[in-house]
Amino acid sequence: MLVAFSVTPIGTGSASVSAQVAEAVRVVRESGLPNRTDAMFTTIEGEWDEVMAVVRRAMLAAGGGAERVSLVLKADDRAGVSGSMTSKVESIERRLQG
């Protein structure tokens, strides 16, 4: 499954939350699961239980010292398919070239 998520700590006393978000991304990268981070979301690929466990740890890491944490999550669960994080983008790129 693919999960794209975003965490936003609330109540940190600062307009910038990049330090807290970096901690969430660190958790994702250390998980060993395929992942990609862009300006809006971090995407992780794996089995439901392992992906959701990483999302939870990332949310807790981002929330350290915050009063609240907002979590936005979008999931695509397609049985028997892996490598979707790259193959979906490759498919679009092929269509754009043809």
Image (spheres, rainbow, N blue to C red):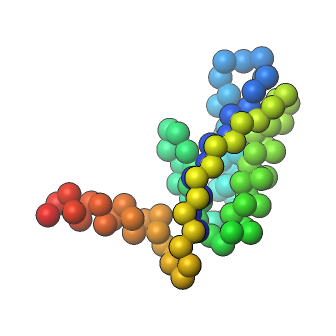
Q: Position of residue 5 (x, y in %)?
A: 61, 48
Taking the spot 47% from the left edge, 69% from the top edge, the residue there is 84
Pick whichever, 74 or 91, lies toward us: 74
User: Which image quarter: residue 17?
Assistant: top right
Residue 74 x/y as whole percent: 58, 52
| 76 to the left or right of 95 | right
Residue 95 percent across, percent down from the top left: 22, 63
Compared to 23, does 9 lie above or below? above
Residue 21 image-quadrant placement: top right
Nearer to the camera, 42 or 32: 42
Foreground pick, 37 / 6: 6
Using the image, determine if residue 75 lies above or below residue 67: below
Q: Is residue 6 above or below residue 97?
A: above
Quadrant of image for the C terminus: bottom left
Q: Is residue 19 visible?
A: no
Residue at figure coordinates x 65%, y 23% from the top left: 16
Q: Would residue 48 be seen by someone viewing this image from the given angle?
A: yes
Q: Quadrant of the N terminus?
A: bottom right
Q: Please tell me how many numbered marks the rendered image carries.
A: 0
Image point 74% across, 49% down: which residue?
58
Of all residues shown, which one is farthest toward the left? 98
Q: Is residue 94 left or right of residue 54?
A: left
